[in-house]
Amino acid sequence: MKQSLIQLHVSVLLAGFTGILGVFIQLNELPLVWYRMGITFITLLCILVLRKQKLQLPFRKTMVLTGIGMLIALHWVFFYASIKFANVSIGLVCFAATGLFTALLEPLFNRVPWKKAELLLGLLSLIGIYIIFQFDIRYQTGILFGIVSAIIAALFSVLNKKNITVAHPQTIMLFEMGGGFLLLSLLLPAYLLHFPKAHWVPSFKDIFWLLILAWLCTVLAMELMLKALHNVSAFTQNLTLNLEPVYGILLAFILFHENKYLQNTFYVGIACIALSVGIQMRRIVKHRKL
């Protein structure tokens, strides 16, 4: 139990840094994710070939993992769009709604009754978002993109949980990153056609940060998360991911001084999110069951 929780929280810490990198990297949201998934795919392919690890999977499983990867790609695009249209704090806090959407979706896929405790804890996170933004209309577009990102994140997390045993975690990641990269490769020409002024050619600094984003915040973070999913539920994973805003926002305060632009209600909302995570962790330890 402890090892899985440690793996999960380290992956969340790394994930919290992705929002900061979204500011450092000057590319638009779709090209940014396209490079991220492409670099990650090539890196994983090299690692698995060097390890002589089996890469072949049945056709149906390949298609399922490819589809999940496409959802991951869309989640990341909307997540970075939220940051680009608003700021790091907005994008990360909206992501906290993932817990509620997971509590709604996971029972549907597993054909089990909804758990009232999980629904209430997820709702507490959503209340935190509402408290933060109820009087602030400056970031409506960013908030909308953030909520869409959270819905997609909940969906692919539930699907990942159902398919976690089909292959080694890095093999799963390879097919998922390949699926996402394929989807964005198909969408990129149309995106650039509709947004001709979009920044899509990376500078040397962008390349450096893209490598950090791909190698540390994607390859390492996702492997830890997939390993943790062997023992934890998708809901516990996503509720723990609500700590991502805490880590990322603290970094945004230090690096970008975003605290100057946030209202006092922001801190009340963050307290609700942290409370929901704390209660869920207490429930896990109390029942000795992830």
Image (cartoon, grey):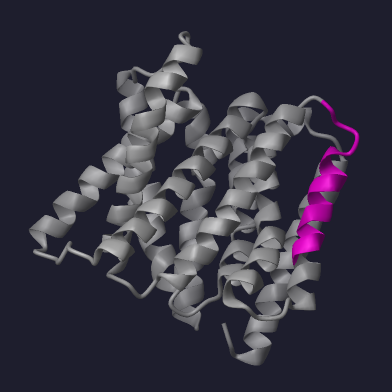
Would residue 65 be counted in the magenta stretch? Answer: no
The answer to whether one can see residue 212 in this image is no
Instruction: Give the image quarter of residue 32.
Output: top left
Tell me if 227 is positioned left or right of 20 in this view.
left
In the picture, the quarter occupied by the C terminus is bottom right
Q: Which residues are magenta?
A: 122-137
Image: 72 above or below 116: above
Q: Nearer the viewer, residue 247 or 283?
A: 283
Would residue 127 be counted in the magenta stretch? Answer: yes
Tell me if 276 is positioned left or right of 133 in this view.
left
Tell me if 178 is positioned left or right of 188 in this view.
left
Q: Nearer the viewer, residue 195 or 237?
A: 195
Q: Main secondary structure of the magenta part?
A: helix
Which residue lies at the image location 70% right of the left edge and 82% below the top edge?
283
Which residue lies at the image location 30% right of the left edge and 46% below the top edge?
178
Image: 136 above or below 214: above
